[in-house]
Amino acid sequence: MANFCNVLLWLSHQCLPLRCLVCANPGNDGLDLCAACYAELPWNDHACPLCALPLPPDEPAKVCGACLAEPPRQAGAAATFLYAPPIDRLVLRFKFHQDLAAGRLLSQLMLHAVPDFAQHPLLPMPLHGRRLRERGYDQARELARPLARELQLPLWTGLCRSRATLAQSTLDADARRQNLKGAFAVRATPPARLTLVDDVMTTGATLDAAVRALRRSGLQEATLWVCARAP
C-alpha cells in the first residue's frame, strides 16, 4: 500500500503545484511548505549530543545532566525538531492518518539538518506485524528510505519486533521500560555501526531497548536520528 501511495505522491508532484501542508498556501523551494511556515519550524539545534534533549538557550551545548549521571547506550543522538507546532501535527497526520505526503515532507526537512554521525547504515525502527497490518505502512521506514537514498547509505532491516507491546504514549517512563522487555529480536548479524531512525523520541526507552538487543548481537556503536524530540 505504501509503495502505491508513494507512486501517487510522485505523480501528483509532477502534475500539481506544491501546496503547504500546514496552511494550504503555495509551497516553496520544492517543498509542500510555504516560506512563512518554514520560518516557524521548531528546529532542535541546541541540544544534548547524546540524547537530543533540548537545552536552555543560555546554556552551552553540552551533555545534559541525565546523560552525565547515567550515560546512554548510544554514542550520539540528533532530533531535527522539537515536538511542537507545526511539526507535531504533521507527525500525527503521518503516523495515524495515513498522510504519506506529511511523511515525505518530514523526511525532506530532516535532510536540511543531517547530523555529522549519519555516515553508517540506517536502521528504521520496526513495527510489530500486527500494527503494521493495521496501519498499512511503517512510518520509520517511510522516513528512512529517502534519507538513505539521498545520503547514499545502506538501509539495514535486520531488527524486528518479536512481540506486540502496549502503545508507549499511554505509559510513564518506568512502565515504558517494562513494556519493552524482550520486544526486539535481531535476525541477522548487524554491521559494526548503525544509525537508528524513528519519528519521535520521548523518553528514549524504545530506542534504548533496540540498541540493547543489537549490542547483544554484535553491534559496536549506535547513534539515533529522529524527526522530533519531546522535551
Image: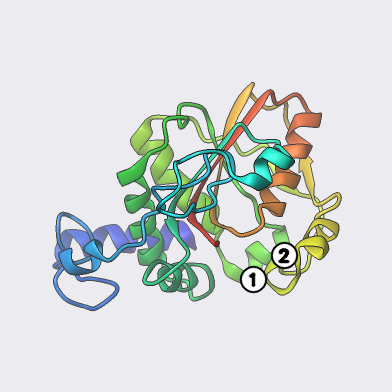
Residue 229 showing in the rendered view: yes
Residue 32 showing in the rendered view: no
Direction from residue 158 to residue 209 in the image, left or right: right
Q: Give the residue drawn at x 86%, y 49%.
A: 182
Identify the image's colour scheme: rainbow, by chain, secondary structure or one colour. Answer: rainbow
The residue beneath circle 1 is 134
Label 1 SS: helix
How crowded pointer 2 is (Cα within 10 Å; few <14, some 14-19, many 20+) is rated as few
Q: Quadrant of the C terminus?
A: bottom right
Q: Disc 2 and disc 1: Cα gap in Å?
A: 6 Å
Do the CB atoms of the residues marked 2 and 1 lie less than 8 Å apart?
Answer: yes
Residue 223, percent from left and from top: 58, 35
What is the quadrant of residue 73 in the picture? top right
What is the quadrant of residue 224 in the picture? top right
Above/below status of 175 relative to 209: below
Q: Give the residue drawn at x 80%, y 51%.
A: 162
Q: Give the residue drawn at x 75%, y 70%.
A: 171
How crowded pointer 1 is (Cα within 10 Å; few <14, some 14-19, many 20+) is rated as few
Disc 2 marks which amino acid?
A: Arg
Direction from residue 2 to residue 106 in the image, left or right: left
Above/below status of 6 relative to 22: above
Could you tell me how many numbered marks the image carries? Answer: 2
Q: Which mark is residue 130?
A: 2
Direction from residue 139 to residue 39 in the image, left or right: left
Label 2 SS: helix
